[in-house]
Image (tube, rainbow, N blue to C red):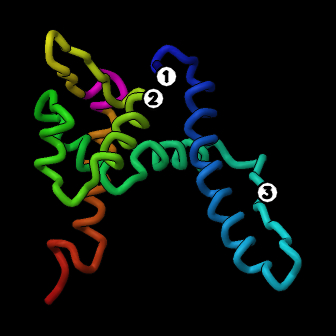
Amino acid sequence: MIGSLPEQGRRDLIMNRSWDSSRQVVEGEANSASSQQGRQEKVAARPDAESAEECSAQLAINLIQGKWKTRILSRLQHGPVRLSELRRMFPEASKKMLTQHLREMEKDGLIIRKDLSGRLRHVEYFLSDSMGFAVLHLISTLTKWGKEYLPYGANAPE
């Protein structure tokens, strides 16, 4: 589990996952654009000289990046939940996508997967004490900011 890794190892894992996914997009764009140019691949260089503040902000964004992650985390603040319950709560989300998000959040140390299987398969997910509740505070801060500054928020002039 990622919670046992040193802090720098955790950051590297999160950044690598984000880097890999952004690199795939850039490579895909390069491949589609290069059909006339002889399959020239463009891969953006990873910046090595980022400030610590920017890097920390990007790490935090990478933790909650995903269509269903903030919704799952918000639900988990009320207690443990099973995958089947999440599927009922978010019927438009596929089982595959929910499972993928849950696995990523478990690797990142945000949630804990507890296998309670006896005769039947029974797995529950709940927030980790350290990072799980801290990320809820981050989501709450983002929500307040969105309500205050986004034009379609609750405080928008009519």
Q: Which residue is mark 2?
A: 107
Whether residue 76 is situated above or below residue 39 in the rendered picture: above
Quadrant position of the C terminus in the picture: bottom left
Kind of element beneath mark 2: helix
Query: Does the stretch in magenta take in 131?
Result: yes
Task: Write the residue at 31% across / 31% down.
Answer: 132
Whether residue 108 is situated above or below residue 52 in the rendered picture: above
Instruction: Give residue 136's position: percent from left, percent from top.
Output: 27, 40
Q: Amino acid at mark 2?
A: Lys
Counting residues from the start of the chain, the first of labels 1 and 3 encountered is 1
Q: Amino acid at mark 3?
A: Ala
Q: Left or right? Give the position of 54 relative to 90.
A: right
Quarter location, residue 122? top left
Q: CA distance from mark 1 to mark 3?
A: 27 Å
Q: Which residue is mark 1?
A: 2
Counting residues from the start of the chain, the first of labels 3 and 2 encountered is 3
Instruction: Give residue 100's position: percent from left, percent from top.
Output: 39, 42
Task: Write the residue at 61% across / 25% down.
Answer: 9
Q: Amino acid at mark 1?
A: Ile
For label 1, count other residues whose C-alpha is less than 10 Å away and answer few (under 14), some (14-19) or many (20+).
some
Kind of element beneath mark 3: loop
Task: Write the residue at 79% across / 80% down.
Answer: 35
Whether residue 38 is situated above or below residue 104 in the rendered picture: below
Q: Left or right? Give the position of 67 relative to 18.
A: left
The answer to whether the residue labelled 1 contacts the one labelled 2, judged by CB atoms less than 8 Å apart, is: yes
* Residue farthest along the bottom direction in this orientation: 158
Quarter location, residue 127? top left
Q: Which residue is mark 3?
A: 45
Q: CA distance from mark 3 to mark 2?
A: 26 Å
State which region is magenta. 126-133
Task: Write the residue at 17% across / 32% down.
Answer: 82
